Amino acid sequence: MRQRGLDVLLWIVSRLVPEREREPLVGDLSEEYAVRANAASSSVALKWCLRQVCASAPPLLWANLRRVAWLSTIGVAMLAYVAVGVVEFGVNWGLSIASGHETAAYNPVGMLITFPMVVIIGYSTARLRPSAPAVLATMMVVAVTVMTLSANESVPLWYRIAYFVVGPAAAILGGAVKRLRFAPERG
Amino acid sequence: MKKRDDPLGSLEHIVLLAVMRLDANAYGMTVRREIENATGRDISIGAVYTTLDRLESKGFVRSYTGEPTAERGGRAKRYFDLTADGMGALRNTHDVILKLSAGLKGLQPT
């Protein structure tokens, strides 16, 4: 009966850790169970094991959540990418209306307006996840590459090439500004 | 990314000291026992493992797998040892504690 209880506890704890830590952690608990069962009784050893599993669950679960932190980094970068798209669309739309000509939207003025906005987006994403601006920049490079290779005639080539550099640079710059602003002072 | 000269967290500090004391016999349960004997704290094995994992990702300890043993049901141990960066982090934290506690009354060793 107690062996079955121990097996259940070991199974529970083994589910809370990545595979490479499973064998040593379960082995450690088995070893300590045997030591305590010999020194006192199997009942005392089992209670100790139960307390250990209950106390170990929160830090092990938290560590698991931290291991999947890259998912939230990608999520933040994707939201930022959408925000960049909305900003770009808004600026181009505003310039089209102002000039009264659709292709007039693709001009350096649009880029000059968009650049600081993307810096701000990069800065904001870095506040949420430090690595998000780098992921955002990578997404932008991939998107512009795909757009260039797909030979979309409606977007001028100079604009695509400029965005290949300007967009990712703005995102990285935003992240760098955040790092500089919150860097601890050193003597 | 934490740098080597950042002071260690309190549990990180204690776990690193335990690894150093245990030398070649530092694995999860011996580290836990060492801390329990020194502090009287019934620390959980999960907290020890997550701290060791964090210290390894910072480059302060490295781990290797030992041979499986019968008393562990044929399961292998994961041994840890201190790296040069870990030693540097321990020295730095020790220096900070000494500097901050120097001259303070009531902090002499008992």
Image (cartoon, coloured by chain):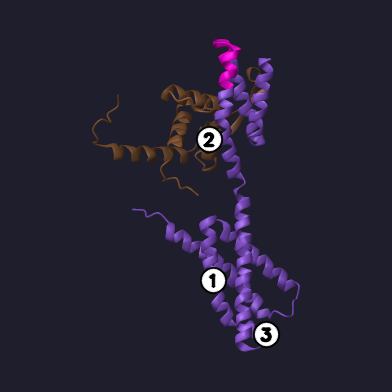
Chain colours: A purple, B brown
Residue at left offset 63%, top offset 85% = A97
Does residue B66 appear anywhere in the picture?
A: no
Q: Are marks 1 and 2 in contact (CB under 8 Å)?
A: no
Between marks 3 and 2, how big is the CA–CA gap? 59 Å
Name the mark nearer the viewer: 3 or 2. 3
Residue at left offset 38%, top offset 39% = B93
- Any mark on residue B52, and which? 2
Q: Give the structural element (helix, strand or loop) at label 1.
A: helix
B29 in relation to A78, above or below: above
Question: On the image, numbered disc 3 is attached to which residue?
Answer: A103
Quarter of the image for residue B92 reads top left
Q: Residues within 10 Å of mark 1 (few under 14, many from 20)?
A: some
Which range of residues does the magenta coloring cover? A36-49
Instruction: Look at label 1 and name its amino acid.
Output: Met
Question: On the image, numbered disc 1 is attached to which residue?
Answer: A117
Q: Residues within 10 Å of mark 2 (few under 14, many from 20)?
A: many
In the rendering, at what x and y percent does residue A105 appear? Answer: 63, 82
Main SS, magenta region, reads helix
